[in-house]
Image (spheres, rainbow, N blue to C red):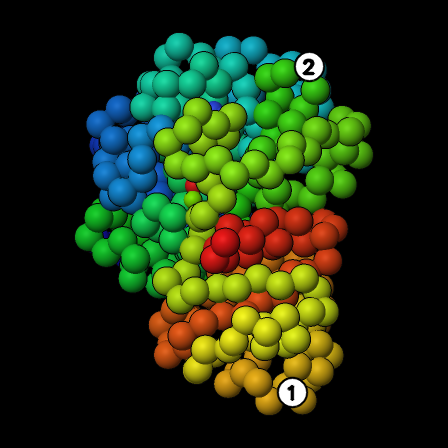
């Protein structure tokens, strides 16, 4: 594995490597992606292998121009065009009917394809220089916390990736919002870095399916939507806003343990109980964007430390709070 900078000559090397069928970890505004040429079946197979990702979990294809949507999607409904014009580039993935040229391994055999135009200038430049759409899941072992720095990728994947482009920490910090645009009404498949409010402002109401206790291996409308995902190795217990520490106390608190809460004010209230060995704040300035950007880094740090359990409180369910609560829920013990 070789680490590349964001200088143009290094981005050109990354692009050439993609064209040659190599795996390149790329910074995006959401999380680091493990990229491969989307039209190279063998390279895409190596992505699944590197992540130990089950092949029924399809990848998102990344493009660097709105027009390139036609390289992978067979048809693009008017509402999808409106979303692309209004919100791309950005942390929004759309599910569309797949073009037959897209290898089945990318879409896990589904007749649909996931497409995103990322905003990060480094990701855009690499895709442009590569001249091919780039299939990229998050650059972490399947089921584990997503990487938001190059160091996370290097620690987790090591020599299973050929190049890591170090573009610094990711701004958004949680994965893209996934919207299925293939039916009569748009459906939210995964809350993420693009606020649902912003999407509904463009295309009107989006269907939010209830969370059902499906498991890995079932035929899911969005196969990556397993209830347990994005999980740290340290057990994480999730509580309603404002219910720590009483709810945690009633189940017994492991030592050493850490509480994870939204704001500094809430942290001070919890510290006063002297029940946890540490209290970590998701958003020092009390901002949901900041909380999203810091979430996975904090979970990585907890896993590198000595804690035996993490006791987390939900954040407000609005804007990026939906994605944060979704990731916390799926990281948690059920
Ligand atoms: P990741 O790239 O690891 O962040 O995960 C990609 C997400 O997009 C997963 O939740 C997948 O299940 C979802 N996805 C990708 N392709 C499709 C598709 N064709 N239909 C529905 N969901 C998809
Ligand atoms: Mg992932």
Q: Are there few (<14), some (14-19), or many (20+) residues within 10 Å of tag 1? A: few
- Label 2 near ligand 1 (CB < 8 Å): no
Q: Residue 56: horizontal and vertical position, in percent?
A: 35, 28
- Label 1 near ligand 2 (CB < 8 Å): no
Q: Residue at x 74, y 39 (%)?
A: 198
Among numbered discs 1 and 2, the one appearing first in the sequence:
2
Q: Residue at x 28, y 25 (%)?
A: 40
Q: Residue 95: horizontal and vertical position, in percent?
A: 55, 24
Q: Is residue 243 visible?
A: yes
Local SS, label 1: loop
Left of 127 or right of it: where is 253? right
What residue sits right under mark 1 in the picture? 273
What residue sits right under mark 2 in the picture? 184
Residue 163 bears which disc, if any? none
Residue 230, compared with residue 207, is above or below; it is below
Q: Residue 10: horizontal and vertical position, in percent?
A: 32, 49
Q: Residue at x 65, y 43 (%)?
A: 194
Q: Residue 75: horizontal and vertical position, in percent?
A: 56, 11
Q: Nearer the viewer, residue 118 or 9?
A: 118
Q: Residue at x 35, y 39 (%)?
A: 35
Left of 272 or right of it: where is 276? left
Q: CA distance from mark 1 to mark 2?
A: 52 Å
Local SS, label 2: loop
Q: Quadrant of residue 34?
A: top left
Residue 118, compared with residue 172, is above or below; it is above
Residue 218, compared with residue 305, is above or below; it is above
């Amino acid at each position: 594995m070789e680490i590349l900078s964001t200088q143009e000559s290094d981005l050109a090397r990354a692009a050439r490597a993609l064209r040659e069928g190599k795996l390149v970890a790329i910074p995006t505004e959401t999380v680091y992606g493990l990229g491969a040429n989307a039209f190279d079946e063998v390279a895409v197979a190596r992505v699944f292998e590197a992540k130990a990702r089950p092949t029924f979990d399809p990848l998102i294809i990344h493009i660097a121009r709105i027009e390139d949507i036609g390289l992978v999607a067979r048809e693009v409904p008017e509402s999808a065009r409106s979303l692309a014009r209004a919100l791309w580039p950005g942390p929004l993935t759309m599910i569309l009917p797949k073009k037959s040229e897209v290898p089945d391994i990318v879409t896990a055999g589904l007749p649909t394809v996931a497409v995103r135009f990322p905003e990060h200038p480094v990701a855009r430049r690499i895709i442009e220089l590569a001249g091919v759409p780039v299939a990229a899941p998050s650059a972490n072992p399947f089921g584990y916390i997503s990487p938001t720095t190059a160091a996370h990728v290097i620690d987790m994947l090591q020599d299973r990736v050929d190049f890591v482009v170090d573009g610094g920490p990711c701004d958004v910090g949680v994965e893209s919002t996934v919207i299925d645009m293939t039916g009569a009404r748009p459906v939210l498949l995964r809350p993420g870095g693009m606020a649902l409010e912003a999407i509904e402002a463009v295309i009107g109401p989006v269907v939010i399916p209830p969370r059902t206790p499906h498991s890995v291996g079932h035929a899911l409308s969005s196969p990556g939507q397993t209830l347990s995902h994005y999980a740290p190795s340290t057990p994480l217990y999730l509580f309603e806003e404002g219910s720590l520490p009483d709810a945690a106390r009633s189940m017994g608190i492991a030592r050493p343990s850490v509480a994870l809460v939204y704001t500094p004010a809430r942290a001070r209230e919890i510290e006063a109980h002297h029940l946890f060995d540490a209290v970590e704040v998701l958003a020092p300035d009390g901002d949901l964007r900041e909380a999203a950007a810091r979430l996975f880094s904090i979970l990585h740090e907890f896993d590198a430390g000595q804690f035996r359990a993490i006791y987390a409180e939900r954040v407000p369910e609005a804007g990026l709070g939906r994605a944060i609560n979704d990731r916390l829920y799926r990281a948690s013990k059920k």
